Amino acid sequence: MFIDVAEIEVQAGDGGKGAVSFRREKYVPKGGPDGGDGGKGGDVIFVADRNLVTLMDFKYKTFYKAEDGTAGMGKKMYGKEGKNCLILVPVGTIIEEKETGRILADLTEDGQTFTAAKGGRGGRGNVHFKSSTNRAPRTAEPGEAGEQKKLILELKLIADVGLVGYPNAGKSTLLSRLTQARPKIGDYPFTTLTPNLGLAKLQDYRTFVIADIPGLIKDAHKGRGLGFEFLRHIQRTRVLVFLIDVSAVDAKAQLNELKHELELYDPKLLEKPQIVVLNKIDLLEKQNKLKLNGKNQECYRVSALTGEGIDKLASALAKILEELRNEE
């Protein structure tokens, strides 16, 4: 099961209370205060892990708590700090505060961490309250409470290339041709219900990651069909591949409608580098160019089924990505 949005609650540990204690040693009948401080509460820390691909675990466990600090002791002994609560999430996870909607962190690199809730400070022992007028204080501080927050976790897959197309356009088949990924493939719409990632490897050792995401339909920007599931992940990709089924009645209309849906959801998506791929040329021969808004747009003609044109497409994608990296 693929889960890309989850709501959880986190609780950092409370600080331990300070101790009220006095020296009790032989020949020192009236020793001074020696109560130690309480230990700090543990923090709640998120850690991005590249081995995870879903937020499914958070569907079953929604509350996470760090350990409380222990109380201080006599002889000025400090209480033990509470253990931190480490929460592993996939790379590409956004952490949002539920009450305010404020984005707290965007974990885009393996091993990246974020402290979502800080543990409470330990209370001071009575040794800190000794004064010239109070030589035997019986006062100590309680520990501070740890932070508690309700959070929304949202996963946006990170990929170099995102495949954009209508259901049954052949995205899953193309992904399996370009990479070693083996997504579910069928001849009916919405075979792909969850995002799939694959690693393309060229003969010259260049590599890049491709995301096959559930197909778009009209009004996907409103959440219709699998719209939000698709559009959320396409925001992370660096290059867009518009996959057009040439066996359809109007290929140009397909391309215009796909771009329109992206623009309505987030106009910045169309600022990304783009490639148009005409798929299923084994079924119908089409021209090598589409006329769009008075301009000719270069297209790549492929058959994901037979493999025709796949090598040329892979090389073109690798070249675009290399140019982007050089610019950066």
Image (tube, helix red, strand yellow):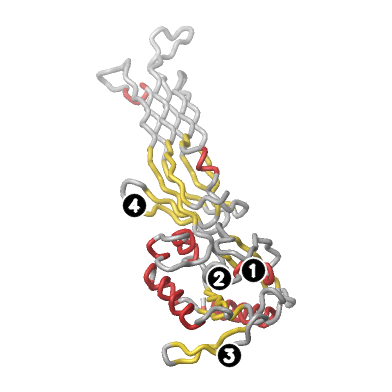
Pointer 3 and pointer 2: residues touching (CB < 8 Å)? Answer: no
Q: Residue at x 61, y 71 (%)?
A: 170
Distance, label 4 to label 1, CA atoms, is 35 Å
Badge 1 or badge 3: first in the primary sequence:
1
Give the mark toward the camera: 2 or 4.
2
Disc 1 marks a residue whose amino acid type is: Leu
**Local SS, label 4:** loop
Determine which quarter of the picture holds residue 203.
Answer: bottom right
Q: Which residue is mark 1?
A: 175
**Local SS, label 1:** helix
Distance, label 1 to label 2, CA atoms, is 8 Å
Question: Which numbered marker is on residue 26?
Answer: none
Badge 3 or badge 2: first in the primary sequence:
2
Give the mark toward the camera: 1 or 3.
3
Pointer 1 and pointer 2: residues touching (CB < 8 Å)? Answer: yes
Pointer 1 and pointer 3: residues touching (CB < 8 Å)? Answer: no
Determine which quarter of the picture holds residue 14.
Answer: top left
Q: Which residue is mark 4?
A: 101
Residue 218 at what x, y percent from top left?
A: 42, 68
Disc 4 marks a residue whose amino acid type is: Gly
Disc 3 marks a residue whose amino acid type is: Gln
218 sits left or right of 178 in the view: left
Using the image, determine if residue 306 lies above or below residue 54. below
Badge 4 or badge 3: first in the primary sequence:
4
Distance, label 2 to label 4, CA atoms, is 30 Å
Distance, label 3 to label 2, CA atoms, is 21 Å
Q: Which residue is mark 2?
A: 163
List the single residue furthest toward the front. Answer: 249
Residue 126 at what x, y percent from top left?
A: 36, 21
Badge 2 or badge 4: first in the primary sequence:
4
Q: Which residue is mark 3?
A: 287
List the single residue furthest toward the left. Answer: 133
